[in-house]
Image (spheres, grey):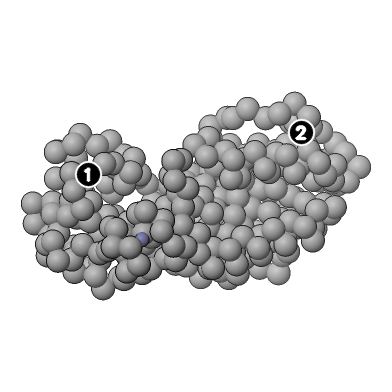
């Protein structure tokens, strides 16, 4: 993978460094860092969508539908709106409003203090808020579990009502919330749903979303000819169009850029950027913790 090159001093000694030291050196040497964060980062720091965290929260849904994974379950076609909200209200408290701080997010934030960086994430959980990031530097391209949208996408506005979600969790029984708690679109009367992107319909993108998108694009533009580190952390292959592919394409276009992929799984790397690719395959939380403690 990473070959010695004239732009990055670190590239000449890379093979002698531990993965945490290598990451630190590259971050120190970079003029700009674009960080892409996927589900693997949240999973590495304890916010898993499978196992005990799922089975403890949704034993009834698992028994009824044989669901295997909380993220898949959140996209399931439930019987009706009352059942949909019985699931989503619990899901949104667990993965957003009541989500605790993740150590890997704290470590990464500390590593970025005083750095020129920007983040794009496909995660819709609350990990960045919980770890007190500067949210002007985070672009949440796949929405947020804390927001709602019109299921017909009749207008580009999102809504939030944490108190109502808590009431749904409290008052649900037999996997249904009371009918009068089901929220509807104030404009067209269609059902509201959790703010998320689907292949068929896309996603409601309001002013808040476009501000985030503009800031991210501005950062890419301002730094496009610099020594940029494209650092993807826990990015799989579910939606490669948001992080993985653009990062690889931008690396290819800028000969000074490096592509760093932190993932225990190995994914295909286009041949043109292989000499400028660094793969960090040790545990994400451990590497970030060691790197941030130096
Ligand atoms: Zn509507």
Tell me the residue at 18%/36% (across/down). 65
Label 2's element? helix
Q: Is mark 1 within 8 Å of ligand 1?
A: no
Ligand 1 sits in quadrant: bottom left
Q: Position of residue 291 (x, y in %)?
A: 62, 54
Q: Nearer the viewer, residue 75 or 58?
A: 75
In the rendered structure, the answer to whether residue 256 lies left or right of residue 140 reads: right
Residue appearing at x 68%, y 54% in the figure: 34
Q: Is residue 129 visible?
A: yes
Is 223 placed above or below 10 here?
below
Work out which quarter of the rendered image holds the C terminus and state it: bottom right
Q: CA distance from mark 1 to mark 2?
A: 44 Å
Location of residue 149 by image quarter: bottom left
- Can you see residue 17? no
Which quadrant: the N terminus?
top right
Q: Of the residues tagged 1 and 2, which is closer to the observer?
A: 1
**Residue 249: where, in percent of width, then height?**
73, 39
Q: Which residue is mark 2?
A: 273
**Extreme residue in the bottom direction:** 163
Q: Which residue is tagged 1?
A: 78
């Amino acid at each position: 993978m990473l070959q010695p090159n004239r732009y990055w001093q670190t590239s000449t000694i890379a093979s002698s460094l531990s993965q945490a030291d290598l990451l630190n050196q590259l971050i120190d040497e970079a003029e700009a860092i674009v960080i892409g964060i996927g589900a693997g980062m949240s999973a590495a720091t304890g916010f898993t969508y499978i196992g005990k965290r799922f089975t403890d929260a949704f034993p009834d849904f698992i028994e009824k539908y044989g669901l295997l994974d909380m993220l898949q379950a959140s996209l399931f076609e439930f019987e009706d709106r009352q059942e949909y909200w019985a699931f989503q209200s619990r899901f949104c408290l667990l993965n957003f409003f009541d989500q605790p701080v993740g150590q890997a997010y704290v470590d990464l934030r500390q590593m970025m203090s005083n750095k020129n960086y920007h983040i794009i994430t496909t995660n819709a959980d609350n990990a960045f808020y919980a770890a007190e990031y500067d949210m002007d530097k985070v672009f949440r391209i796949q929405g947020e579990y804390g927001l709602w949208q019109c299921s017909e996408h009749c207008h580009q506005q999102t809504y939030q009502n944490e108190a109502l979600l808590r009431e749904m969790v409290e008052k649900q029984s037999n996997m249904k919330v009371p009918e009068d708690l089901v929220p509807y679109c104030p404009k067209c009367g269609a059902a509201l749903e959790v703010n998320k992107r689907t292949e068929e319909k896309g996603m409601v993108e309001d002013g808040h979303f476009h501000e985030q998108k503009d800031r991210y694009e501005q950062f890419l533009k301002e730094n496009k000819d610099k020594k940029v580190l494209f650092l993807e952390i826990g990015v799989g292959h579910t939606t490669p169009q948001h992080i993985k592919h653009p990062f690889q394409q931008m690396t290819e276009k800028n000969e000074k850029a490096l592509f760093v992929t932190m993932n225990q799984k190995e994914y295909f790397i286009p041949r043109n950027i292989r000499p400028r690719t660094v793969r960090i395959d040790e545990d994400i939380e451990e590497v970030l913790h060691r790197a941030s403690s130096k």
